[in-house]
Amino acid sequence: MTVASQVKQTLTSLKGARGTLRVYSTQTRDEETRAMFTDALEVTHSIIDDLESRLKTLEFEEPQYKGN
């Protein structure tokens, strides 16, 4: 498995986790818990942005990985 495909797989997993966190944050009634989920969403979003940027770099440096 190439590095690019591993990064893509990680991105897919993180996006799924982000969706789950979003659901939990909207369903909870406790404000402290909601704030915790919101913070986790922000961190997850930041990581996803970083990995997407890294993936673009990988695809630019190694064109054979693009679209795989």
Image: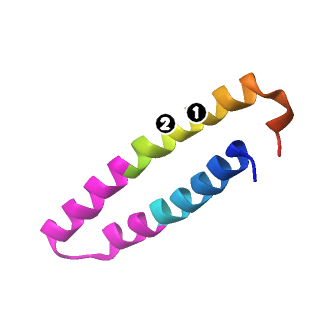
The span from disc 2 to disc 1 (Cα, nearest Å) is: 6 Å
Q: Quadrant of the rendered structure where residue 39 is?
A: bottom left
Residue drawn at x 58%, y 55% is 10
Marks 2,1: beta carbons within 8 A? yes
Q: Quadrant of the N terminus?
A: bottom right
Q: Dot 1: within a 10 Å radius of its alpha carbon, few (fewer than 14), some, or many (20 or more) residues? A: some
Judge by depth and name the residue closer to the eye, 7 or 39: 7
Query: Quadrant of the rendered structure where residue 21 is?
Result: bottom left
Q: Is residue 5 left or right of residue 31?
A: right
Disc ID at residue 14: none
Q: How would you classify the magenta stretch by its main secondary structure?
A: helix
Residue 66 visible somewhere in the drawing = no
Residue type marked 2: Asp
Which mark identifies residue 54? 1
- Using the image, determine if residue 37 lies above or below residue 45: below
Question: Against 17, is 58 above or below?
Answer: above
Q: Nearer the viewer, residue 10 or 3?
A: 3
Q: Is residue 64 magenta?
A: no
Residue 44, x across and y down, in percent: 40, 51
The color scheme shown is: rainbow
Q: Secondary structure at mark 1?
A: helix
Q: Which residue is mark 2?
A: 50
Between 58 and 36, the one nearer to me in the picture? 58
What residue occupies the far front of the structure in this picture?
Answer: 1
Which span of residues is magenta-colored? 20-43
